[in-house]
Amino acid sequence: MDDENQTPDLVPDNRFEAFRQAEALVENRRPLDALKALRPVLEAEPDKPSVQLLAGRAYFHSAQLNHAERAFTRVLELDPADHYARFVLGRTLQRLGRLVEALGQLRMAWAMNPVPEYQDALSEVKARVRLQEG
């Protein structure tokens, strides 16, 4: 099928522009608008890790944590070596109150890429788990 017969939302150039617009909206703290911009890209390319990761970030920042969890989990199904997806999945699980699960994801993220942000998150969740255990 040539580009002339595709709907505008499905033309690759339009998807790229929509993706970039959604990225900018997430960066500008407008996650709901980002999700609207990203919708045609999600529909056209649901198995693309970068698309799921951006959707997950938008869901996370709009407190749609169950959707965020699903998006980040999908990224990891597609690319198990994505340390950032593990980190944000861990943060999502933390916000959902699932600290033990969060701890596992944060440990893996930190082992894959030992940056201070990951270490700080890991330390925070470890401390909360210890408090809960008494």
Image (cartoon, rainbow, N blue to C red):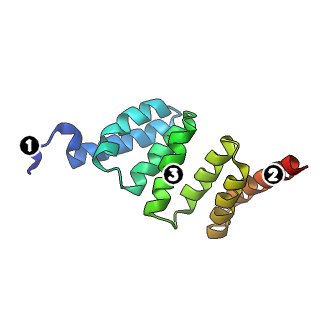
- Which amino acid, mark 3? Phe
Q: Is residue 120 left or right of residue 90?
A: right
The residues bearing labels 1 and 2 have C-alpha atoms spaced at a distance of 55 Å
Residue drawn at (59%, 51%) of the image:
88
Q: Which of marks 2 and 3 is nearer the N terminus?
A: 3
Residue drawn at (30%, 39%) of the image:
40
* Callouts 2 and 3 close, C-beta under 8 Å: no
Percent across and percent down for residue 75 are 46, 56
Judged from the image, the secondary structure of the residue bearing numbered disc 3 is helix
Q: Earlier in the sequence, mark 1 or mark 3?
A: 1
| Labels 1, 3: front one | 3
Residue at which label 2 appears: 129
* Callouts 1 and 2 close, C-beta under 8 Å: no
Residue drawn at (68%, 53%) of the image:
102
- Which amino acid, mark 1? Asn
Residue drawn at (62%, 69%) of the image:
112
The residues bearing labels 1 and 3 have C-alpha atoms spaced at a distance of 33 Å
Percent across and percent down for residue 100 are 72, 54
Within 10 Å of the Cα at label 3, are there few (<14), some (14-19), or many (20+) other Cα atoms? many
Q: Which of marks 1 and 2 is nearer the N terminus?
A: 1
Residue 39 circle label: none
Within 10 Å of the Cα at label 2, are there few (<14), some (14-19), or many (20+) other Cα atoms? some
Judged from the image, the secondary structure of the residue bearing numbered disc 2 is helix
- Which amino acid, mark 2? Val
Q: Is residue 12 left or right of residue 79?
A: left
Query: Which residue of the protein is positioned furthest toward the right in this rendering?
Result: 134
Residue at which label 1 appears: 5
Residue at which label 3 appears: 72
Q: Nearer the viewer, residue 66 or 88?
A: 66
